[in-house]
Image (cartoon, coloured by chain):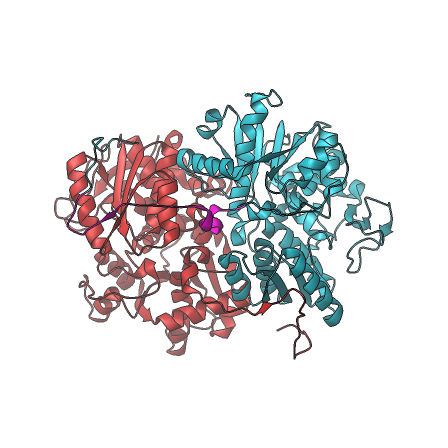
Chain colours: A red, B cyan
Amino acid sequence: MTHLSHLECPRCGEELDASRLQNLCGCGSPLLVRYDLDAMSKDVSPKDVEAGREDMWRFHKFLPVPEEEIVGLGEGMTPIFSLPDAGPEIGAHNLSLKDEGFNPTGTFKARGAACGVSMARYLNATTVAMPTAGNAGGAWSAYAARAGIGCVVAMPQDAPLLTQQECSLFGARTYLVKGLISDAGAIIGRAVERYGWFDASTLKEPYRIEGKKTMGLELAMQLGWKVPDAVLYPAGGGVGLIGIWKAFEELEAMGWIGPERPKMIAVQSEGCAPLVRAFEDGRRDSDFWEGAKTLAGGIRVPKALGDFLVLDALYESGGRAVAVSDEQILEALRLVARTEGLFICPEGAACVAAVSSMIADGYLDPSDEIMIINTGTGLKYSEVVDVDLPVLEVDSDIILDDGGVQT
Amino acid sequence: MTHLSHLECPRCGEELDASRLQNLCGCGSPLLVRYDLDAMSKDVSPKDVEAGREDMWRFHKFLPVPEEEIVGLGEGMTPIFSLPDAGPEIGAHNLSLKDEGFNPTGTFKARGAACGVSMARYLNATTVAMPTAGNAGGAWSAYAARAGIGCVVAMPQDAPLLTQQECSLFGARTYLVKGLISDAGAIIGRAVERYGWFDASTLKEPYRIEGKKTMGLELAMQLGWKVPDAVLYPAGGGVGLIGIWKAFEELEAMGWIGPERPKMIAVQSEGCAPLVRAFEDGRRDSDFWEGAKTLAGGIRVPKALGDFLVLDALYESGGRAVAVSDEQILEALRLVARTEGLFICPEGAACVAAVSSMIADGYLDPSDEIMIINTGTGLKYSEVVDVDLPVLEVDSDIILDDGGVQT
């Protein structure tokens, strides 16, 4: 038994049946999942959750999937690391990072895929299909393989080779497209019509938000049922930020946290900053960003279907949308690796890079508890790191001018 | 307070002081760490451990590191996955896999590095140095960065680019060598002499075994303080197998498990199988394997310093050493990905490949509880996977002969 009630359109208020597969609302908006929170609060306590499974499904009562229908690969319950060296170097003395690189397939996409695939199979989808920049495809392919359902993905030809390999290995029908992710999306859209597959494109199905919501649930639990002063999230489609925000709402409705909210901060790249532009104009929706370009592929999203939900959370929390340069991203990535032993992804590094300017202008305080969502492992982004190492002959020696002291 | 007692030579019986940095015994053997197990058994219970930290340090009472000296990055407490589809396909109906790919830096090397770096810093080493095939270097570099001590690694020029990048990013002094890991070892040996660094080469320091021992401790705990019927481990240096075996000894001495032991099975590649050759000859030590060649880099070790400890465990447990071909490795890797949604490493895949022949000849029973140690994530081995994907023009369509049904 779950506490799933119905699907609700956050734009027009329409309520839809949650007992069958649904995509968008008739008005074109993504749908949000609603629960019977009264029944839920009688059924589960913080202690139950704390003593639960070692993965995100310790929150299964907050989720739409019946327990026996869970398709899991060990997703969630990712560690939070303090950054005691990197933080002070950029002026933040209480800086931490929730490391989503510990998920199966190496990114936070696993959370959305676990929930999305579980629900798709439960509601009798036999094949899920989607366009992807890479990591979502890898995750959905893995869970579809585990679930024993089909998966079809189309990705730009320049998608990271590692994600092409993942999708192919996991047995997805995998296509490269000579174009952008939007071109891949159009191809998938036509194929979905032709073959009757379930369209699992980002925000075109309602359940990946629920999976990503567990980031916010875990965050509150790991901090002792409190929220930090600020959450920095690298926003491409923005689903994770929407999910974290929804988690806090539900936890408050349950009485597990109070009305306090962190400043929700969406971080983008200067080469693709549609949410930043919309935020600076005080608008609730964003314009398509022409010529999107950044080395952080996960935030190279010219127009997010859920932009208004992201922007709502920023405005309501007193948050911000900020952009950083690719150079700042690489510098932050190197800083965190060298000082903390963590190889974070460029998207997570964008958040680290965004901190110093917000402290410099007084928006954040050096003592604020600042939480960065590092959405994946750097291991999936080897192409962004240049190395030029000394090469030794077998009979040669390491000779150092500095006497070999610690550097 | 720890229960660390002393270091012991498993070959000549010599006891050494554990309060200072030590490398090999005077007789040339690696050293094992010994504890006051009586005091330990009064100080910790299975319940304490079960309620402990979310990482391998829930077993800190079994380890040499004082709690306040732990250098951690979230290592250990990796999930165990059943293989309900891949298992039966190869004749094993109770086949599981402990997935070490969930560790920081993506491999089980993190466990040894966490314990080794913690102890090195605690005992006042300022720089650790080692040769590496790649993954150990990545792990030790990460923990050294976290610990704030220096790290020097030398690796063959053909080591995976991803591990070169890791070491460099983590701030290690990183050298490529035009030769084998043994050549890199010689260069490190001379540099250690010259600069006074601590030699942290595999088994030349006693503490990485202790870190890897936690795989065995966790395994027993995760199975309800029982051991499986067989453990398959991909043996390069064999440190993990030595550690798992030591874990079972200590758990029995503590009274947490009985005298039962799994068959300990060392898996190697046909292109580098020194332990298999020694085992088949009934010997306690192995010969250097000339011309070692396999795509599974982690088991391309021509001669392991701890070969006699591995072979002892095989003989005492009624185990075996078996070799598989590179073709079998790739086939097993693809099988597990396609059917289970797990992208395992070639070394873990070697273990999967080894199962069917041992069931076919009656050594293992189809109903045996068989546990494979998958030592790392496949994400670090992208070079072993070939993909050849269809490429679509932007205005083209996905056209399928089979009607698009699940494949």
Residue A254 can be seen, yes or no: no
| Magenta residue check for B377 | yes
Left or right, B200 with respect to B55, comes to right
Which quadrant would residue A113 be assigned to in this image? top left
Residue closest to the eye, A326 or A278 = A326
Residue at 59% x, 32% y is B223
Q: Residue furthest left?
A: A27
x, y percent for residue A306? 23, 54
Residue closest to the eye, B67 or B165 = B165
x, y percent for residue B357? 56, 26
Residue closest to the eye, B189 or B68 = B189
x, y percent for residue B324? 57, 35
A169 vs A396: above or below? above
State the count of labels: 0
Which quadrant would residue A344 be assigned to in this image? bottom left
Residue closest to the eye, A117 or B156 = B156
What's the magenta region?
Answer: B376-397
Residue at 86% x, 50% y is B15
A220 vs B406: above or below? below
Give the quadrant of the N terminus of chain A: top left
Residue at 38% x, 54% y is A258
Residue at 67% x, 31% y is B320
